Amino acid sequence: MANELYVQKIVNDKVYYTNGVTGKTVYSKIITKSPVIKHRGREYKFNRETNTIDLTDLIQTDGLSPMTTASEFSINQRFTFLEKFTSMVISNVTASLLVCGQSGLGKSHTIMALIEAQKLVEDTDYVVIKGYSTPKALYATLYEHKNKLIIFDDCDSVLMDPTSLNILKGALDSYQKRTISWLSKGFIDDGLPASFDFEGQVIFISNRPLEKIDGAVKGRTISVDLTMTIQDRIDRMTAIIKDILPQYSLEIKQEVLEFIDEHKFEAVELNLRTFEKLIKVHASYDADPMWRQAAKYLLVQS
């Protein structure tokens, strides 16, 4: 079966197994001598009774394409919650929102679509901050835009630094007026006050799992966890298929989605960007069935 790895032998805590897809023999170390196997950057349980590793029995993965156990709420329900909570921030019903989940699955797109629908003007009503941010840069950003909606997108470095984290906690608080302070004389030289009142709103979009976010941060804001299992990803693609690359036919997109579903456990990366790439590949081959080979290559290559 394509969804199983067949174990050949175990030597010095290394499992030698045959990949059911490629037929190649490879090995992986058993982590801390427990029945956990790493395969293509993901972790699976090793069944010693059947001598197999079931690719559907996924425990966790690396930061590139993490999976999780199924949520009580469907992924499409959670995106509905995201839309509602984002609207609450835009209308200033609540001061902040924290959104967590893997990259490339529509978090930022959903939020920005709602902001554009409300006809907010960038740099006047809101700003988007992307990438690495130092504590000083974070403090300056909050000060310069203290009356605006600030969207921090892919700024997870803020969550790793204790000083940045304390500043962020102040901005995420639920009060209308939040006093943010920095007791450093050096800031005066840069034209920044030692403290100021922040009356804007904050949406913080993170690629980190919600359980890895500081508890004091989560406690100050509304949090939405969009971490997805493999099936969640398929379900989300199905729900928004008409909106993805609308210039391509629905028939092509449905064929690609069926193909992805068939090979989902072999995929190195599985997100909306993957879906879009394979749609374009299918369309470029016209009616030539060889598109499947090209798509398979892109889907499973490491």
Image (cartoon, grey):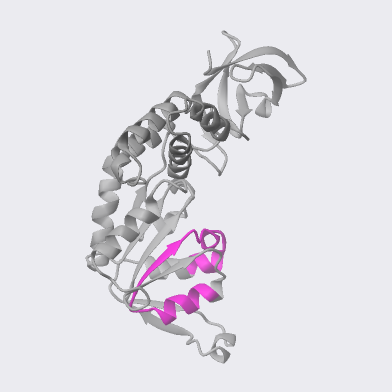
Point out the stretch of residues depicted in magenta.
Answer: 137-166
Vertical comparison of 34 with 84: above or below = above
Q: Which of the 4 image quadrants contains residue 201?
A: bottom left
What x and y, as percent, mark residue 101?
A: 43, 47
Residue in the picture at 44% in, 64% down: 152
Number of numbered callouts drawn: 0
Vertical comparison of 269 with 47: above or below = below
Compared across the picture, whether 30 is left or right of 237 comes to: right
What x and y, as percent, mark residue 236?
A: 34, 39
| The magenta stretch spans residue 154 | yes
Say which of 115 and 73 sits in front.
115
Vertical comparison of 3 with 41: above or below = above
Q: Is residue 9 visible?
A: yes
Compared across the picture, whether 90 is left or right of 254 comes to: left
Say which of 262 and 204 sits in front.
262
Residue in the picture at 55% in, 43% down: 64
In the current view of this chain or complex, which residue is farthest to the right?
12
Q: Is residue 221 visible?
A: no
What x and y, as percent, mark residue 151?
A: 39, 65
Q: In the picture, which quadrant includes the C terminus?
A: top right
What x and y, as percent, mark residue 10?
A: 72, 15
| The magenta stretch spans residue 144 | yes
Compared across the picture, whether 243 is left or right of 91 comes to: right
